[in-house]
Amino acid sequence: MLKLIREQLKSSVLFKAISFNSLGVLAKLITGFAISKFMAVFIGPSGMAISGNLSNFMQSLESLSSLGLQNGIIKYIAESKDDKLQFKKVVSAGFLISLGIGILTSLFLFLFSDSLSQLVFSTLKYSILFKTSAVIMPFYALHIFFIAVISGLKKIKDLVIINIIGYLLSALLIIFLMNRNQLDGALLSIVLTPLILFLSLLIKFKLVNKVIRNISFISTSKPYALKIISFFSMTLFSGVMFPFIFLLIRNHIIDTVGVTEAGYWEATRKLSNYYMLFVYTLFNIYLLPTLSEDVNNTKFKNTVLNFYKGILPIVLLGFITIYFLRFFIIRVVFTDEFLSMQELFGWQLIGDFFRIVSLTIAYQFFAKKMIHKYLICEIILMLFIYLSSIYLVNYLSVLGAVKAHAFSYIFYTLLMFYVFKNELFKRHVAE
């Protein structure tokens, strides 16, 4: 009996996704910890807070430059991968939109480089960073395009290999530049990383070339182009506004508490991003394609429950381990100067656990392109995070920021259960 269960588990798509994805996450964790260690040594908490502002801006810009391409392409590739003609139309439309938006973003960066430097750093000193980013943005947009197509095809093994190579090359670049120029090197590396990610695609040149062969100006479909573009509004809020809100929260912490404490908060968020990568990549390589393939919406409940059963026990065990090893993790990943951030771990982990619970359900918004419901829920979440963070930071210092994170995603989980109550709790829903 146990043998039969084991064989069924090994044959499941989710198990395969977890297995391959774990390798990618391990590589990201190792390289991420190495980067964080060098940042802690070379630029300290204050430098980490400053580099965090640029990272948040770049995240917003990168999300905008991809124009919602990733989730849109994954959805329509998953739906059309068995139809050669439709597949060609999706690929062609996605490529042209990606390249066009990448070029437009580049023009914006180049023309407003001085203003952006003043906005992010309160100085014109770093305008060259934005001009450099202007050259790189089209490559990043194409990187997102190819990754989205590969994800939609469920080429999990190939995707993980590409990601691992990208992580390693990016880490080497960041460490090299920080070693040479400390904070300036760290900032330059953040700008150059998208180019490195694009170059990592070459490791799977045959697969990329196969995608390229399906790109045709003649086959470009206006209906598919409009469908993909419709994801812009969703990406605008999740990919652009959230990093901007974090920038505002960080600046509020700097103004009311101090730049060092803002660095502790940024370091906590960096650690969170590392271990959350495991779940986010599973969302894109397994959950979103699976939900998108369910055209008649008959397997949503089972898909969510299976994801919970397969992922949440692992996540819970991992989070408990991280919490009890937090002192060791801080000393290994950062330096003793960051030990004060240990009090932030508990609430950050609670918030991240409920973030996983809620986003597993929320990915149905993308799979079924429920734009209006998505936007309303995202606006509510953004307001909750921002207002609760500002309020709690004023009373609880930097600890208030992570408490606000936890409260926000507990609230968002309840909101998702309410929005999808019919699909999740009604007995008449097909199993």
Image (cartoon, grey):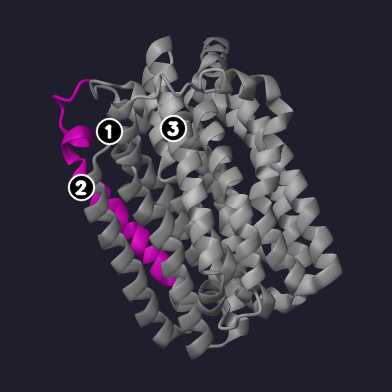
Residues drawn in magenta = 403-431
Work out whether residue 90 or residue 1 is closer to the camera in this orientation and state it.
90
Residue under label 2: 372
The residue depicted at 66 percent of the width and 43 percent of the height is 197
* Amino acid at pointer 3: Gly
Say above or below: 245 vs 283.
Answer: below
- The residue where tag 1 is placed is 368
Vertical side of 345 occupied by 173: above or below: above
> Residue 325, can we see it?
no
Which image quadrant is residue 23 in? Answer: top right
For numbered disc 3, what is the local secondary structure?
helix
At 50% from the left and 28% from the top, the residue drawn is 149
What's the residue type where badge 1 is placed? Lys
Which of the marked residues, 3 or 2, is nearer the chain's N terminus?
A: 3
Q: Main secondary structure of the magenta part?
A: helix
Q: Residues within 10 Å of mark 2 (few under 14, many from 20)?
A: few
Q: Nearer the viewer, residue 208 or 38?
A: 208
Residue 301 in percent (x, y) is at 28, 30
Give the image quarter of residue 385: bottom left
Q: CA distance from mark 1 to mark 3?
A: 18 Å
Q: Residue at x 38, y 49 (%)?
A: 235
Which residue in the structure is indicated by mark 3?
A: 94
Placement of 292 over or under 399, stated as above or below: above
Distance from the alpha carbon under mark 1 to that under mark 2: 11 Å
- Dot 3, how many residues are within 10 Å of its Cα: few (below 14), some (14-19), or many (20+)? many
- Mark positioned earlier in the residue sequence (1 or 3): 3
